[in-house]
Amino acid sequence: MITFRVGNILESQSEALVNTVNTVGIMGKGVALAFRKTFPDAMEEYLRAVRENKIRVGEVQVVKTRYITPRYIINFPTKTHWRYPSKIEYIETGLSDLVLKIKDYQIRSISLPPLGCGNGKLDWKIVKPLMISRLGQIADNVEVIIYEPGFSDQEVVHKEEIKLTPARAMLIYLLKQYQVLGYSVNLLVAQKLAYLLQRFGEPLNLEFEKGTYGPYAHRLFHLLKYLNGYFIRFREEENTPGTIITIEAGRYPLVEDYIADELSEEKKERLQKVLKAIEGFESPFGLELLATVDFIVQQTRAWDYETIMKDISNWTSRKKEIMKPYHVAVATKQVNTFDSF
């Protein structure tokens, strides 16, 4: 089956991703630059092949990665030199070799950019039917995703490997566990999970203050930006509570291994406390409600429902409107159990 998307190919969960390259090893812009930053090991294989004169138009290079997804990076030469435009015959012969490689490696899913378009200067109206024709030969057994022109955010990637720390690993772990429950992760959710993680004793060195959507720490966004393009992905330019965060599935096993091998039992217990605390509140509104109530309790040491309700009403007009008495009552009851975890 062949499907079309407009978006960032680096966010694809396909078994193989196709990267467009030239034959001289220059990756200065576009998709190639994004791949170079995201998969430096695979790009070293490409550069080694360039030095050995093994990269030629009409022949693709398959590089196995150390990730679950993508398992393979396939370098597809669309230009002989970075200065020169692509030619349609480069795409034709390259697609023929790509189909053979897909069969040889028994690849079951693959994502491709618009080959030779963009910096290659080819017309998508000509390239698209060619890709459909050639890839249609294997589409009955392989999931083929073609990313069409129109997305300019390919370079939201990280330049180098990010080392995990307890704080980084624990936050990513909580985001993933929340996602596993079937909910979308966004910046609001990240703020509230970080708040609760620190609430249960993890020294994140975050200063939470009253925000429109509950307790908010400005420094957390800087941490998320640092992780962006490597362990997580989101559009930094949006920076709204609803901005969606996706977890890099191919690198998440690194987080799991770090949690299992490097975290103390005390830190593992804190993670479980957070997950237990949010039971029944697994939504952006639920987390905002829970964190807001706990923040008030921590600031005022008032545990009675009436005082908490009054503080919520004085927080913002938005909270006063959407957080009804029965919401606050349920959240207060849950917060009152935190110290027993």
Image (tube, rainbow, N blue to C red):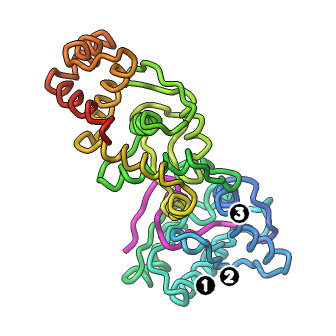
The disc at residue 40 is 3
Name which of mark 3 and mark 1 comes first in the sequence.
3
Name which of mark 2 and mark 1 comes first in the sequence.
2
Give the spatial CA distance, label 2 vs label 1: 6 Å
Q: Amino acid at mark 2?
A: Glu
Q: Residue 68 in the image: state x and y as whole percent.
A: 51, 71
Q: Say which of marks 2 and 3 sits in front.
A: 3
For the C terminus, give its image quadrant.
top left
The disc at residue 13 is none
Q: Residue at x 40, y 71 (%)?
A: 2
In the rendered image, which residue does mark 1 sit on?
A: 97
Q: Residue at x 55, y 90 (%)?
A: 104
User: What residue span does the magenta drawing correspond to?
Assistant: 1-23
Q: Which element is circle 1 on?
A: helix
Q: Residue 251 in the image: state x and y as whole percent.
A: 54, 61
In the image, taking residue 22 as reference, residue 292 lies left or right, namely: left
Q: Amino acid at mark 3?
A: Pro
Q: Amino acid at mark 1?
A: Asp
In the rendered image, which residue does mark 2 sit on?
A: 59
Relative to 56, say whether 123 is above or below: above
Q: Could you classify mark 1 by the number of other residues whose Cα lies within 10 Å: few (under 14), some (14-19), or many (20 or more)?
A: some
Q: Residue at x 24, y 15 (%)?
A: 320
Instruction: Using the image as rendered, state which of residue 231 and residue 112 is in the foreground.
Output: 231
Name which of mark 2 and mark 3 comes first in the sequence.
3
Give the spatial CA distance, label 3 vs label 1: 24 Å
Q: Residue at x 54, y 34 (%)?
A: 220
Q: Residue 229 in the image: state x and y as whole percent.
A: 59, 50
